[in-house]
Image: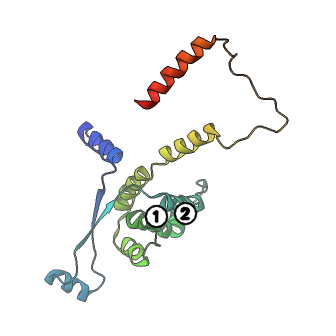
């Protein structure tokens, strides 16, 4: 990937610009192929992927945690690969459908079916990478860490003595009046 392309993708991610996902729709029958040729059925589909909402990030994360990939056995690696394809392909299509749909309502099953029937393995990998970039999990974790360190709602135990942060400064009455007039002037202006 060229430096300019990487910089553009980084800028698009920061600005949350939608990324265009376009793929060919394969004809499902001879009639479907004829309808595509005369323009009654589309030959391709175009969707735009934006950053996932928190609700959809939760949905996608839930599916991702359900995916179990066991170690590659020493024996039959082909069988292991086919078992992963058999068990995880639908989940991957669901993740992509959730990210493309990106609304409060459940993703439409027709979108999952469209992905299952038309994506190649290469397209699956490319779109999955885009979606994982758009999940922006790093910012989510950072916000949790930030809130956790603030701990505003934590209260001290009732037996704890209040901690003295600074010693009181002894001032004369004239100094207090001067501070009061400065303070009052700042509030009025």
Q: Residue at x 49, y 48 (%)?
A: 137
The spot of residue 172 in percent (x, y) is 63, 10
Q: Is residue 119 left or right of residue 84?
A: left
The spot of residue 56 in percent (x, y) is 48, 62
The spot of residue 147 in percent (x, y) is 58, 42
Query: Residue 63 has which mark?
Result: 2
From what the image shows, is residue 77 above or below residue 155?
below
| Pick the front one: 168 or 96 | 168
| Pick the front one: 111 or 26 | 111
Are there few (<14), some (14-19), or many (20+) residues within 10 Å of tag 2?
some
Say whether residue 43 is visible. yes
Mark-to-mark CA distance, 2 and 1 = 7 Å
Q: What SS does tag 1 mark?
A: helix
* Residue placed furthest toward the bottom: 31
Q: Quadrant of the N terminus?
A: top left
Dot 2 and dot 1 residues touching (CB under 8 Å): yes
In which image quadrant can residue 53 be found? bottom left
Query: Residue 105 has which mark?
Result: none
Query: Sequence-wise, which precedes: disc 2 or disc 1?
Result: 2
Q: Residue at x 80, y 38 (%)?
A: 157
């Amino acid at each position: 990937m060229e430096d300019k392309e990487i910089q553009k993708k980084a800028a698009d991610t920061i600005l949350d610009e939608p990324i265009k996902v376009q793929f060919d729709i394969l004809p499902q029958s001879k009639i479907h192929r004829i309808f595509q040729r005369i323009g009654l059925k589309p030959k391709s589909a175009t969707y735009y992927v934006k950053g996932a909402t928190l609700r959809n990030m939760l949905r996608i994360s839930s599916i991702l945690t359900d995916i179990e990939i066991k170690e590659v056995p020493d024996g039959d690696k082909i069988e292991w690969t086919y078992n992963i394809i058999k068990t995880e392909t639908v989940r991957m299509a669901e993740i992509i459908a959730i990210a493309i749909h990106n609304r409060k309502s459940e993703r439409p099953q027709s979108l999952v079916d469209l992905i299952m029937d038309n994506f190649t393995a290469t397209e699956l990998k490319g779109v999955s990478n885009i979606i994982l970039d758009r999940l922006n999990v790093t910012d989510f974790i950072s916000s949790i860490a930030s809130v956790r360190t603030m701990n505003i709602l934590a209260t001290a135990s009732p037996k704890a003595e209040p901690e003295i942060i600074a010693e009181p400064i002894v001032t004369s009455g004239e100094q207090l009046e001067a501070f009061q007039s400065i303070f009052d002037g700042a509030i009025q202006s």
